[in-house]
Image (cartoon, rainbow, N blue to C red):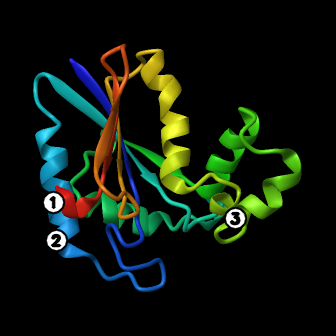
Amino acid sequence: MKFRWIYIDIEETLIKSLQIREFLEENCEKIKKFLKQLNDDENYYLAHIFTWGWKTHDDIDYSLVKTLTNKLEIPEEQFTGVFTKSDSVTVARNVGWLKDEHVEKAMSYMGMGSLGLGKVKMFCKYAQPFCINHCVSELILIDDLVKPSSEIRYPTDSKIRLINPKDL
């Protein structure tokens, strides 16, 4: 059985923004179809929201999360939660990619990118140990920031897939 972790961005991937909650219908339909293809007798996925639009867990609008997971028809038992900017900052700090004195800057708008830890790069750094240790067969990021869609393969037969929703 192939086990996948899927991370899905919100802003400009599923909706215009957290302030303008207009669905990007074409993206949503493509992502929903993609997710349906990942569930069968040989495959299973767990889905996460991966957004820096919400800085901390206190910022999360759980009614929007429910609306988004319903829109994508993600089974409740396959949705694990929301990965916010503070989660990324914590990971970066804990593994030594970010110094303690840069945490405040990292939490600011564009702060992680200015420190060399853009969202897609941060995802790859976060995902790499899971692939090297073969905990999962595939980690997938679906985000409008991905340009172009690509994949990184590891000798363990695990891989990271970076997907722009327009490429689905």
Q: Residue at the spot x=13%, y=45% of the render? A: 36
**Earlier sequence position, callout 3 versus callout 1:** 1
Q: Is residue 58 left or right of residue 101?
A: left
Disc ID at residue 111: 3
Disc ID at residue 26: 2
Disc ID at residue 30: 1
- Taking 93 as reference, is 130 above or below it? above
Q: Is residue 109 left or right of residue 166?
A: right
Q: Residue at the spot x=63%, y=48% of the render? A: 87
- The Cα–Cα distance between marks 3 and 1, rounded to whole angstroms, is 31 Å
Q: Which is more toward the observer, 111 or 28?
A: 111
- Taking 79 as reference, is 129 above or below it? above
- Taking 100 as reference, is 61 above or below it? below
- Three-letter amino acid code at disc 2? Glu
Q: Position of residue 28 (x, y in %)?
A: 22, 65
Closer to viewer: mark 3 or mark 2: 3
